[in-house]
Amino acid sequence: MKKTRNLLLLMGILALAAVSTSCGESGKASSGTTAAAAASDQGGSEAQGKTEKAGEEKSSEVKTMSGADLQALEDDKDKKETALVIDVRSPEEYAEGHVKFAVNMPLDTLKDRLGELEPWKDKTLILYCNSGKKSGEAAKLLAENGFKDVINADGVKQYDYKLVKYGNITGEELMKKKDEADLIVDVREAKDYDEDHFDKAVNVSVDKLSDLDSLLPENKDALILTHCYSGNRSQKAAEYIADKGYTNVWNTLDGTKEMEYSFH
C-alpha cells in the first residue's frame, strides 16, 4: 500500500514538471512572435516614413533684401542682368511709379503666370510691393513651386527708390505687341538697324535722343516700344519719352544679345 502511494506521488510530480515545461516553451514562442511582429511593424513604419520624405519636395528658403541693395543692383548695368525684378502690385500702382527695370506681375494673377517665369526657375527673382506683405506671399508661392533663388525686397513705402513711369516687358511680350505698336524705337547702332529691324521701327542714337522729338506721335497715349542690345540704351530712350508726357511706353528687357528676334 505504501509503495502504491509513493508511486502515485512520483507520477504527480512528473506530470506537474511536464506541464510547467510546456507553458514555458509556449510563453517563449508567444514572446518571440510578438517581438517579430513589433519589429515588422517598426520596419514598415520606417520604410513608409522614408518613402513619404522622398516624395516631398523641399521648398527653397525665401531671402530678404534691403531697398538700398536693390537700388544698387538696378543702377549697375551688369548686375541688373543677373536678376529679374517683379513688382507684384496692381497695374495702376505700377504705372504711378516703379523700380527701374521691374516688370509687373500682380499677386492675384501670379499663380496663373508661373509658366512665364519658367526660364528663371534656377535664377534670381526679386519681388517687391508697397510694404513687403504681398511680395512675401508671392515669394512663398514661387518657392513652393520649385523656384530656387527667391528674394523679398523692401517695398516702395519702406525705401525711397528712384521710381520711373515707363513700363518694362520681356522679349516675348515685345513680339506680341509689335504689330499693334504705333512706334518702335530701336536704339542699336545704325549698322545693325540697317541690317534688319522691325517694320515700325525708327533708329536713334542713345547720345542723340532729342532726334526723337520730330518722330514721336502726337497722341500721348500711343503705344511706343523701345529695344536695343540688352535693355540699357532702350531704358534711357523709354525714360526720355515718358518724361515728355507719353503714358504708354514700354522698354524691352531682353535685347538682341539675349534673344534672337524675328523682325518680320
Image (tube, rainbow, N blue to C red):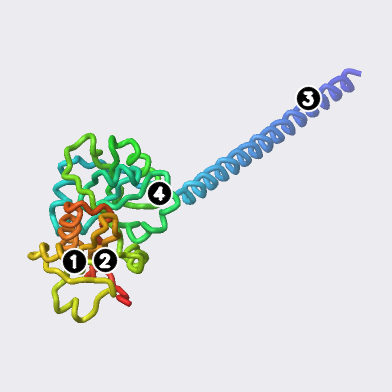
Q: Earlier in the sequence, mark 1 or mark 3?
A: 3
Residue that carries the numbered disc 2 in the rendered image: 183
Q: Give how far apart the Cα atoms at labels 3 and 2 are.
A: 115 Å
Q: Earlier in the sequence, mark 3 or mark 2?
A: 3
Q: Earlier in the sequence, mark 4 or mark 3?
A: 3
Residue that carries the numbered disc 1 in the rendered image: 215
Residue that carries the numbered disc 3 in the rendered image: 13
The image quarter in which residue 108 lies: top left
Mark 4, other Cα within 10 Å: few <14 / some 14–19 / many ≥20: some
Residue that carries the numbered disc 4 in the rendered image: 110
Mark 1, other Cα within 10 Å: few <14 / some 14–19 / many ≥20: few
Q: Amino acid at mark 1?
A: Leu
Please indicate whether residue 76 sits to the left or right of residue 14 in the image. left
Mark 3, other Cα within 10 Å: few <14 / some 14–19 / many ≥20: few
Q: Amino acid at mark 4?
A: Leu
* Front-lying residue, 133 or 262: 262
Question: Could you say whether the residue bearing mark 2 is in a helix, strand or loop?
Answer: strand
Give the foreground label among 1 and 2. Answer: 1
Question: Could you say whether the residue bearing mark 1 is in a helix, strand or loop?
Answer: loop
Residue at the image point whose x is 85% and y is 25% from the top: 7
Question: Could you say whether the residue bearing mark 4 is in a helix, strand or loop?
Answer: helix
